[in-house]
Amino acid sequence: MPSISSTSSSTREFESPSRGRLALYHLRRNPLVALGLVIAASWFAIAFIAPAVAPIEPLKQDLVNRLASPGKQFFMGTDELGRDIFSRVLWGSRITIPAGLAVIVIGSTLGVIIGAVAGYAGGIVDELLMRLTELFMAFPFIILAMAVTAALGPDIRNAVIALAVVWWPRYARILRGLVLEVKSQEFVEAAHSAGAGGIYVLFRTILPNCIAPAVILATLDIGTSILSFAALSFIGLGPEPSSPEWGRMVSIGIDFFDQWWMWLFPGLAIASLVMAFNFIGDGLRDILDPRLRGE
Amino acid sequence: MSFFRYFLRRLILVIPLLLGITMVAFIIANAIPADPINANLPPNALNDEDTIAAFRKKWGLDKPLHEQYLTYLGNLLRGDMGVSIKWRKPVSEDIAKRLPATIELATLGILYGVVLGVGLGLVSAIWKDTWADYIARVIAFIGISFPVFLIALVLLNVFYAQLGIAVGPGRLHVLMRPPPTVTGMYTVDALLNGDWKTFGNALSHLILPALTLALYVSGIISRITRSSLLEVLNQDYMRTARAKGLRERYVIGFHGMRNSLIPVVTVIGLSYGNLLVGSILIESIFAYPGIGFYMFKASTSQDFPAIMGVSLLFAFIYVGVNFAVDILYFFLDPRIRVA
């Protein structure tokens, strides 16, 4: 039945393109997003397979070969205790990626909930929560995170907690505005009159209509969160000194300024990962919310 | 609205904010650590009953929490931020000694940063989608994506170690004596003393760290300038300005810049936070003895009172700068004067 198949193929042109094809279309138009995705995916893969592919244990010391420059034996050289930089850089992804993502997930969830509750409840609750938000925004946030980490005691978990604690205010502010906007719409009134309770309406009716901007912001924020974690770790408020964490490795490398491989490679690892997420974030914003393009 | 009324109104908003900041700092210092005594006293003092008793008494640790806060606030108002564990000296004294160095660096840094950021943003917006735009955006992107400590190390390595055209770490050449202290800022003091050689040397030590800071803060500034100016360029009044025969220079310089400046000024205020954080990361690399280096040393040796002191100071500076930005709006945005 050739006629039928030709009809169906011609009607298909009027169908909206599948999600996959739409994604491909956008990737072709935003090559930087594709590049970012490739780099980020590579780092994710490295994080998974690092234990299998790293040539040497990241903590193994080899004092005979200390401060070896990059070469055949040690691709990225060794540090002051003869530990293999290449292996340490690979292993570092297993700390930085989860830490950076955890900050975003915890921080943005906290912000979304606080903002949503403030916007929905209104009145005194709104007033209190928003004054609290402003207070947190009055601090340069990494400084606040430094103080919190110092108080909790420096380690990876506390650095993540501290960053999450200072991360939420922007999300709260945006979500509150969106909830206020959506709250007055008819379908919310409909849900109320159908007998839905307040919490149900907020989380099932209102929130799904407000979440997209928060997701875009979260994607844009991943790079910053990785940088902030690296900064905390750089000044010694993250993992313990021997840990193969990038920021910490750079920080130890300062004392070995001439052994450039000690600080350059972990530093570039941070930069490449942050850049990848920034490419993705910027592209996603352009695709999902053309209003933010600023043109 | 008169300037005075506007100023007062803003000032009244700042006071609860500052109080709130001290409250947050108090909570972090006293409620989060498992044991504030452990966190605030050097390890060898923990066996000494007298020291502990004195510490309890000074900070009112045996009283209820709200009274502790008042004690804390009272001590703070007297300029008492506790005693550093590492240096065994009052934190406020150390901070006061190092603050001028950081002010010097940060001022130059934000100056470079604004010039660089606004410049790049202008180039990017005016020659949109040309190679100039792409280069400007790549520079901005590097400023945003690269860890500032990496930029600092690379610049120091290239310009000092490899090329030898920049001076090394520190504030002055090791054989030079600092100028007599007036402000504590070496460049200013040297000038006041008429000592051009010292001035030149101090300035040359500032250039590389200030440039690093500038690159760090200019990323965001140039992005905002670009998008803000692009938005303005499409406005009707721009077309009118061109249609009445104004030269492009004036169209962009007067009508364009003036109207796109407000978000840029906001962002400059906000990026002052980045500048402060940047100073911690950069001063540690350039061995530049300011507050940032102090914070770096304090946090690597877990000197809790010193960390809290610097955090509080930075929060105050940040609020102060953003207050100044608010005041600046009055002159930039005529709508405020009418409202």
Image (cartoon, coloured by chain):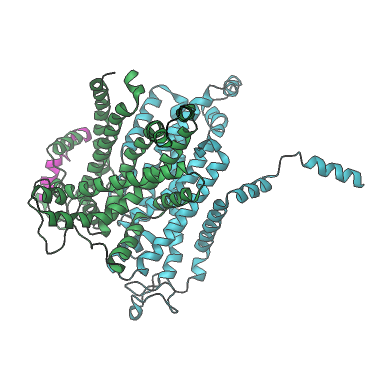
User: Which residue is at the front of the view, B224 or A115?
Assistant: B224
User: Which residue is at the front of the view, A156 or A42?
Assistant: A42
Q: Position of residue B127 (x, y in %)?
A: 47, 44
User: Where B244 sits versus A79, above or below?
Assistant: above
What secondary structure predominates along the stretch shown in magenta? helix
Q: Chain A's colour?
A: cyan
The quadrant of the image that shows the N terminus of chain B is top left
Magenta residues? Answer: B51-67
Q: Chain B's colour?
A: green
Residue shown at 38%/35% (left/top)?
B253
The quadrant of the image that shows the C terminus of chain B is top left
Let me know if residue B59 is in the magenta part: yes
User: Residue B251 occupies which quadrant of the picture?
Assistant: top left
User: Where A258 sits versus B7, above or below?
Assistant: below
Let me know if residue B162 is in the magenta part: no
Q: Position of residue B175 (x, y in %)?
A: 12, 64
Query: Left of B36 or right of it: where is B339?
Result: right
Q: Position of residue B200 (x, y in %)?
A: 17, 56
* Residue A260 visible to an observer of this rendering: yes
Residue shown at 52%/41% (left/top)?
A215
